[in-house]
Image (cartoon, rainbow, N blue to C red):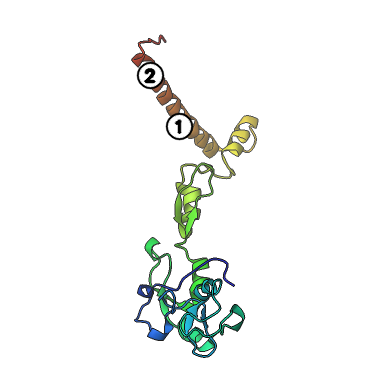
Amino acid sequence: MAGSYQQGYDERRFAEPVRADLFCSICQCVLREPRTCRNREHPFCLSCISQHLRNSHTCPECREDLTPETLKTPRFLKNILSELKITCEFIERGCPGYVLLGNLQNHTEKCGFAPAMCSNEGCRMILNKKDKEIHEKELCQFRIAKCHDCKNIKVCSAKIMTGKGFDLECIEFSLVEILGSLRILNLLLILLYLTHSDDGVSIQS
């Protein structure tokens, strides 16, 4: 049985008009995991009919006796549905074109336009999966800065302190980091001065 309720697919996602017999009798959307009743073969999404059968033991269309065990899986409907062309669920994030419905799950799992959160500590930016690596390594303001032949800033600092294995790029890199910290400190001092000035307190250097 379905773990969480999922109604059928919005017909507007399909490249071409969908046949009338491929719609769920309950949610009125294009069938998702189709099932039918035994005799009249009224079509339903698995989630839709499963939810219905929690409170009823009859087909919502023809009222024949129906239970989860007597539902039929119509192979012919599954084959037809699998050949329909549908947009990716991440189309609004930029995923272009159409994919066969039969390949949709595999495409969705691998889609480069799926949302992904930056894993750098302090950054919670949501971006496309395909952009995650370059963001984390080169663009994120919370990234661990790196230099040539150094794993990160801590390694650079250790090399300079011990005098072993550092080069000019390490020195230049560390100076840039120090200057950046000094700029921040200077801004904090200015803010502190302005705050005390507003309170009528003078700061003597």
**Picture coordinates of residue 174 (x, y %)?**
52, 34
In this rendered view, identify the residue nearer to me: 74 or 109.
Answer: 74
- The residue tagged 1 is 180
Q: Is residue 161 above or below residue 10?
A: above
The amino acid pointed to by label 2 is Thr
Q: Estimate how packed mark 1 is, as few (under 14), some (14 to 19) or many (20 or more) residues with alpha carbons within 10 Å.
A: few
- Badge 2, how many Cα within 10 Å: few under 14, some, many 20+? few
x, y (%) of residue 202? 38, 10
The answer to whether residue 124 shows anywhere in this view is yes
Name which quarter of the figure residue 85 lies in.
Answer: bottom left
Nearer to me, 148 or 47: 47
Q: Quadrant of the N terminus?
A: bottom right
Quadrant housing the C terminus: top left
Looking at the picture, tell me which residue is in the foreground, 71 or 145.
71
Q: Is residue 166 visible?
A: no
State the SS at label 1. helix
Q: Is residue 7 left or right of residue 160?
A: left
Query: Which three-letter amino acid code belongs to the residue tagged 1?
Result: Gly
**In this figure, which residue is indicated by the disc labeled 2?**
195
